[in-house]
Every structure is written in structure tokens, then in C-alpha cells.
Amino acid sequence: MAHAAPPVRTAARPARTPDIFSAQTHRIARWAVPVALGLVYGYWVAANNRDGGPITGWNVLLGFVSAIMFAVLWRGVMALAPRMMRELHAVLWAVFSGCAFGFLIAQTYASLLQSVWLGLVIGATTFAVLFYRYYTHEDAEGHRIR
């Protein structure tokens, strides 16, 4: 018994998913995301440093300084990392995440070796995941596939 051949699809699929946000929304998010993540990180640092004790002025100052530094460094990594090769791109994010996590652990009054060890583990894991992602999303010349 003969069957009909499946129809040949000639319509090209769109290269990217449609962008549903406007350019203004992307501009706002470029600054709002680091600020929001910085505030969460600063609160977390202050809470770890406080260790269940009373909230003091120095504790609040530590939280705000940590939040500002996290947001500034996040924004710097976001601006600098895409211009690098995939290896350095992954290393930059790994160093940032490892240092941020290590500092967070250090505020819990854990030993220095424990905070360094956990920071290295988080950094190495971040490097492995991001290197794999960047490696699989670039062509042979290192250009990002969009």
C-alpha cells in the first residue's frame, strides 16, 4: 500500500524567540536587577554577621556597603564578561561567584579554611557549568550563536 510523502517545509523558522519587552524595559532591567540582587545579598551578609543578635548601626552599614559593592561588581562583570573569550568569560563569573559566596560564609564566623574551601567549590562549579554553556553556544571561531 502506498503512502503519501510528508510535505516539504520551506518556511524558515525564526532565528530567535520574539522579544516581548521594549528597549526601555531592558534599559531599566539592566540596572534594576543588580540593585535588587545587591539588596538581597547585603541583607544576607548583614543577617549572617548579626548571628541572631541585635541589629546595630555597624550591621546595617555592613549590609548596605555589601549591597553596593555586589551591585557594582555585578554590573562590571555584566559589562566586561561578554567581550571576553569563553574561557575568560567563565573564569570571571566563577571568580565573582566564588568570592561572593566565600565572603557570605565568612560572615557566619566559620573558619577561614571553610569559607575559602566553599568559595572554591562554588567557583569551580560555576566555571564548569558556564564553560559548558558558552562552549556549546559558540561556533569554532568563538562567535556566539544567536
Image: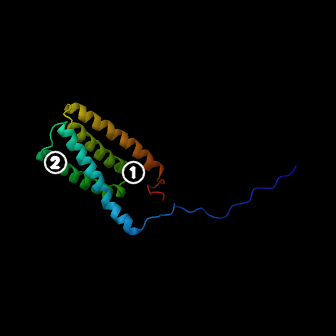
Q: Residues within 10 Å of mark 2 (few under 14, many from 20)?
A: some
Q: Which residue is drawn at 34% across and 39% down?
A: 124
Colouring rule applied to residues = rainbow
Three-letter code for the amino acid on which mark 2 is drawn: Val
Question: Badges 2 and 1: C-beta atoms under 8 Å apart?
Answer: no
Three-letter code for the amino acid on which mark 1 is drawn: Arg
Label 1 belongs to which residue? 86
Out of 104 and 132, give the one closest to the viewer: 104
Q: Earlier in the sequence, mark 2 or mark 1?
A: 2
Q: Position of residue 41 (x, y in %)?
A: 26, 47
Q: Residue at x 59, y 61 (%)?
A: 13
Q: Is residue 55 left or right of residue 19?
A: left
Out of 9 and 34, give the one closest to the viewer: 34
Q: Residue at x 23, y 48 (%)?
A: 42
Q: Quadrant of residue 21?
A: bottom left
Whether 27 is drawn above or below 48: the answer is below
Label 2 belongs to which residue? 60
Out of 68 and 129, give the one closest to the viewer: 68
Q: In which quarter of the image is residue 109?
A: top left
Give how far apart the Cα atoms at labels 2 and 1 are: 38 Å
